[in-house]
Amino acid sequence: MVTGGYVAVAHRLDTETALVEGVALWASLACVWLARTENIWTMPYGIVSVVLLGWYLIEIDLVGQGWLQYVYYVPIQCAGWWAWARGGPGRTELRVTRLTARGWVALLFLALPGWIVIAWIFHALYEDPAYLAWDTSIVAASVVAQTLMTLKKRESWWFWTVPVNISAIGLFIRTETWAFVFLYVVFLLNSIWGWAQWNSAEVGGVRQESP
């Protein structure tokens, strides 16, 4: 239903919707829905979605977002597939946990340098790419969010909500990619819902923290 709504919005705004874009959207929506419900099938759907989204984003000159799909999201989806199934104690199913204070400190020290490095790489690879600093800030935040999701940390949903989805909505409004604005509004709502669900998740019947 949401994919149909996306296509309808794109048509109304005179934005052509290619088949690859529609399939990528369907796979992306399935991926985020399944992630929220802690279903391991989120990973294979995610692999399909990132391959196709990468193709589309590079075509519209958002190179940071595009290459993020291939260089990072494909391998991390494969790693997450294993981690969710066998990453718990004794190779059992991985459970949702929270970041410790040490984990937050590590993120603060790594995220900003990571953003700078990513921006420098794409500045070197492409001549005047569109909205480089903004685009790559979303890339860096997405790397953090997906890494935390692979580790099943509740805080992954906060990163998806604020520095990824809200920021991406602003970027796509600026670039007048209206159908993608619609898509990321859906992603935003799902990330808020996912935060609420994972925040109330329990490990062994009680709330726990892990490094």
Image: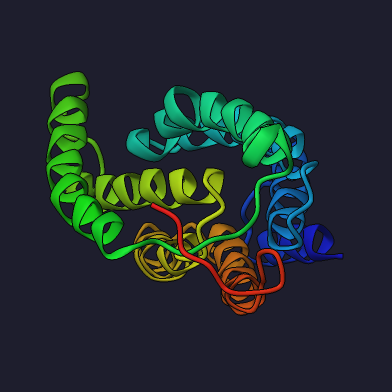
Which residue is pictured at 79% across the width and 65% down the height? Answer: 2
Relative to the observer, which residue lies in front, 182 or 90?
90
Residue 102 position in % (x across, y down) = 24, 57
Residue 146 position in % (x across, y down) = 48, 46
Task: Say above or below: 198 vs 32.
Answer: below
Task: Say above or below: 139 vs 127.
Answer: below
Q: Quadrant of residue 206?
A: bottom right
Residue 117 as seen in the image, left or right of residue 193: left
Find the residue positioned furthest to the top: 125
Relative to the observer, which residue lies in front, 31 or 13?
31
Task: Say above or below: 45 vs 38.
Answer: above
Relative to the observer, which residue lies in front, 110 or 17?
110
Residue 88 as seen in the image, left or right of residue 126: right
Residue 121 as seen in the image, left or right of residue 74: left
Display coloring: rainbow
Which residue is pictured at 73% across the width and 56% down the height? Answer: 38
Task: Say above or below: 93 vs 52.
Answer: below
Residue 190 position in % (x across, y down) = 65, 70
Which residue is pictured at 75% across the width and 38% down the height? Answer: 45
Relative to the observer, which residue lies in front, 181 or 117?
117
State the quadrant of the N terminus.
bottom right
Q: Quadrant of residue 103?
A: bottom left
